[in-house]
């Protein structure tokens, strides 16, 4: 909802809202800790998104240059693998006005990108996870997921702390 001044009802600008958050952050360690968790979660989403886009993009470029007759199903599969990365990067841009929505979308999309391969091709996915690089990648993916799910309640906590100061 719109965030407004409780005294006059005027809608707060992004700069005014940022100043209010900065004041809370300076005065309240709980707010500061919650904001740190939200920032870490969204930074992890951005990093995971950029890595996904980069790796999938390079893979698509290499494969298409090596074989001009790739079936359309391969392109659709590659695009589906690229989509979570794009969504995570877009979530980073929603961090100022809608951090909770950005975190929920990022956590949902990232969770789906981890679970769907297990459902669609379990043997291949598990074999890929068992290699040394696969173990490292799986740990990195799970770390991002944990950070995203920690950021959601932290964002709710921040919103509740600011609520008495804002008309929602």
Image (cartoon, rainbow, N blue to C red):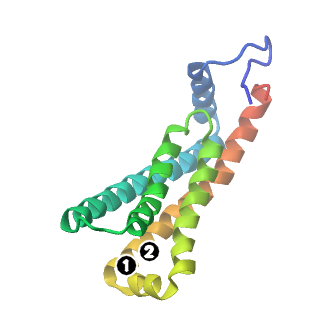
Dot 1 alpha-carbon crowd within 10 angstroms: few under 14, some 14 to 19, many 20 or more: some
Question: Residue 28 falls in which quadrant of the image?
Answer: top right
- Which residue is more in the foreground, 100 or 164? 100
Residue at screen point 49% across, 62% down: 144
* Above/below status of 2 relative to 67: above
- Residue 76 lies left or right of residue 19; in this view the side is left
- Which residue is more in the foreground, 30 or 15? 15
- Residue 8 lies left or right of residue 53; in this view the side is right
Label 2 element class? helix
Question: Residue 79 falls in which quadrant of the image?
Answer: bottom left
Residue at screen point 27% across, 67% down: 69
Residue 134 marker: 1
Residue 138 marker: 2
* Above/below status of 42 relative to 117: above
* Above/below status of 143 relative to 35: below
Label 1 element class? helix
- Which residue is more in the foreground, 142 or 27? 142
User: In this orientation, does residue 164 appear?
Assistant: yes
| x and y, in percent, of residue 164 in the image | 79, 30
Callouts 2 and 1 close, C-beta under 8 Å? yes
Residue at screen point 43% across, 54% down: 49
Residue at screen point 29% across, 64% down: 59
Residue 29 marker: none
* Above/below status of 86 relative to 81: above
Q: Quadrant of the C terminus?
A: top right
User: In this orientation, does residue 29 appear?
Assistant: no
Q: How many marks?
A: 2
Could you tell me how far apart the alpha carbons at marks 2 and 1 are, in whole angstroms? 6 Å
């Amino acid at each position: 909802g719109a965030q407004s001044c409780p005294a006059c009802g005027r809608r707060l600008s992004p700069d005014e809202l940022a100043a209010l958050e900065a004041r809370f952050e300076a005065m309240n360690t709980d707010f500061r800790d919650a904001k740190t968790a939200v920032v870490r979660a969204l930074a992890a989403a951005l990093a995971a998104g950029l890595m996904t886009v980069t790796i999938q993009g390079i893979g698509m470029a290499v494969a298409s240059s090596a074989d001009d007759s790739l079936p359309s199903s391969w392109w659709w599969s590659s695009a589906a693998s690229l989509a979570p990365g794009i969504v995570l990067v877009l979530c980073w841009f929603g961090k100022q006005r809608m951090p909770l929505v950005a975190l929920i979308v990022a956590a949902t999309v990232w969770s789906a990108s981890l679970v769907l391969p297990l459902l669609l091709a379990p043997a291949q996915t598990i074999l890929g996870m068992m290699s040394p690089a696969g173990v490292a990648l799986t740990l990195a993916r799970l770390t991002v997921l944990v950070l995203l799910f920690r950021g959601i309640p932290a964002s709710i906590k921040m919103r509740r702390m600011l609520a008495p100061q804002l008309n929602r």
